[in-house]
Image (cartoon, rainbow, N blue to C red):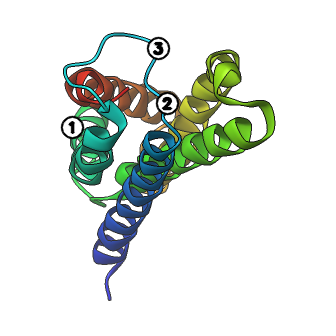
């Protein structure tokens, strides 16, 4: 297996596992009767989101990957930033689940203030490291990953809460 196909597979697996974990959390939140703090399009939003994240998270991961590689001018390896995105989302979901279990649903907001920037830093660090491995400078790689993640959040974020 080539490095490029391994990176692509790892991006698919990481983003898929992140989507599955987020879906499971949404199902648990729905079963516990929780609703998001802001307005939603339908009642029992977490039930709808449990299905959406299965598709949206991998799509976001590969959008971030494509944008980052384009900005960094690194056509290969495909999937290196998708893997970083999936890892960041998975950590985000696990922190949310742990915070909900230990602190309760009402404390998820304050936890988010710390966990979201931390997960973003994880995505940028891991994704940039992958791009540096193919000859992109650290600053350009980090900026490219940051722009890729921003594009993914802007496009997919409105569907997820």
Residue marked by disc 1: 70
**From this viewpoint, which residue is outermost toward the bottom?**
1
Residue occupying the point 42% across, 27% down? 146
Work out whether residue 13 can be spotted.
yes
The residue identified by callout 3 is 37
At 23% across and 44% down in the image, what residue appears?
52
Residue 12 versus residue 55: which sits nearer the camera? 55
Q: Residues within 10 Å of mark 1 (few under 14, many from 20)?
A: some
**Screen quadrant of the N terminus:** bottom left
Please give the name of the residue rendered at 55% of the width and 44% of the height, measured from the top-left corner. Answer: 93
Which is nearer the eye, 57 or 73? 57
Is label 3 in a helix, a strand or a loop?
loop
Tell us which disc is closer to us: 1 or 3: 3
Q: CA distance from mark 3 to mark 2?
A: 9 Å
Disc 2 to disc 1, C-alpha distance: 40 Å
Q: Residue 144, how many percent across, how many down?
A: 37, 30
> Is tag 2's residue or tag 1's residue first in the polypeptide sequence?
2
Which secondary structure lies at badge 2? loop
């Amino acid at each position: 297996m080539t490095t490029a196909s391994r990176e692509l597979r790892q991006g698919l697996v990481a983003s898929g596992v992140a989507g599955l974990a987020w879906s499971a959390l949404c199902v648990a939140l729905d079963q516990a009767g929780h609703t998001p703090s802001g307005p939603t399009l339908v009642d029992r939003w977490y039930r709808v989101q449990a299905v959406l994240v299965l598709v949206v998270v991998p799509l976001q991961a590969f959008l971030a990957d494509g944008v980052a590689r384009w900005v960094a001018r690194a056509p290969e390896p495909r999937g290196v930033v998708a893997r970083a995105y999936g890892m960041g989302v998975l950590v985000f979901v696990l922190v949310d689940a742990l915070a909900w279990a230990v602190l309760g649903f009402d404390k998820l907001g304050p936890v988010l203030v710390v966990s979201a920037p931390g997960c973003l830093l994880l995505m940028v660090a891991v994704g940039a490291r992958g791009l540096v491995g193919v000859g992109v400078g650290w600053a350009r790689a980090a900026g490219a990953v940051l722009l890729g993640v921003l594009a993914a959040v802007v496009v997919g974020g409105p569907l997820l809460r």
